[in-house]
Structure formats: structure tokens, C-alpha cells
Image (cartoon, helix red, strand yellow):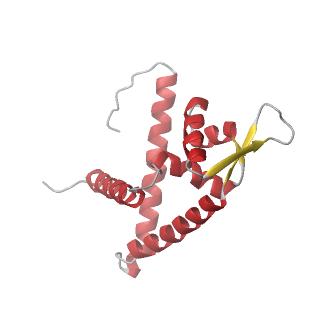
Amino acid sequence: MTPTVLDRLLLISELFQKDMARAFDGTPLTPARTRVLWVLAATGPSTQQALAGALEVSARNITGLVDALEEAGYVRRTPHPTDRRATIVELTERAADVMAGMQRDHAELSSTLIEAVAPSDRAGFERGLDAIAVRLAELIAEDEARRAAGGNTERTAS
């Protein structure tokens, strides 16, 4: 049987998961903790509430992630300058160095992967990836809206 587009995308996802697990082996980093670092590297210091919103996780979940990252020396908490109830989470120098390395690795891997596609096909390939990402996001939003309205939760073929 010929693999479908979804089969290929799932294989790529699994390969990325394996690569990430290999890269984090021997470190306290997990994909979820790395997402926190990635957001902080992109946006700068943040409240835990803002981090939870950006990552679409609960306050309890973000507290556990930040606790683990702080214990491992990747982030520090400081008092919020105007809100006594809030704290600011920021990268440590160690984490900033790690994230700079990850960003370099990310760019290099991106370049290496796109080199597998013939130069004349790259623009079409990127348009196709964008179209798939947009369509998948639409399907997820439609499903979430249907669930919120109490509708059928089974996916139907369109």
C-alpha cells in the first residue's frame, strides 16, 4: 500500500520526536520544558500567567515546568515590579546560551532538510506545507467549536 500524505507527515513527526529525545538525552530538558524556554527566548521575561497562555497550558502545569527549569538552573523568578502577586520568569545566562545553540541548530537543520528538495520544487513544497498547516489548524478549530457547542465529536470525511 502506498503511504498517504498523513502517513508521511506522521513519520516525519516521529523522526523529529526521536531526534529531540536524542538531543535532550542526559539533560533535564523535555519537549514541554524546551517549549517554555523557546517562548522565553522569543518574547523575553514573562509572568507565569502569560507563559501559560502562550503555551495553552494550565497554571498548575506551568508552575511545575518553571519549578523544574528553575531547579535545573535554566530560569529564575524575580518579583514583578508592579504586581506583588506575580513573578517574572526569565532565562538564566546558561539557558540563553543553550537557546542560542538550539536556534543555530534549528536553522542548520532547516537548511539541511530543504536541500533534500530540488531547488525548482522548493517554492511549491513550502506553499504545500503552509497549505497543510493552515488546513489542519482550520480542522482543529472547527472540531473545537463543534465540541464547545456540544455537537458530534467524531471526525467526518469532508
Residue at 66% in and 61% down: 93
Q: Is residue 86 left or right of residue 53?
A: right
For the N terminus, which image quadrant?
bottom left
Q: Where's residue 77, x and y in %?
A: 70, 44
Q: Residue furthest bottom?
A: 119
Residue at 34% in and 76% down: 116
In depth, the one of 116 and 34 nearer the eye is 34
Q: Where's residue 37, x and y in %?
A: 58, 53
Residue at 47% in and 59% down: 130
Q: Is residue 123 left or right of residue 84?
A: left
Q: Where's residue 76, x and y in %?
A: 68, 48
In depth, the one of 114 and 96 nearer the eye is 96
Q: Residue furthest left?
A: 1
Residue at 43% in and 71% down: 109
Q: Is residue 103 above or below residue 78?
A: below
Q: Where's residue 8, x and y in %?
A: 28, 56
For the C terminus, which image quadrant?
top left
Q: Is residue 39 above or below residue 138?
A: below
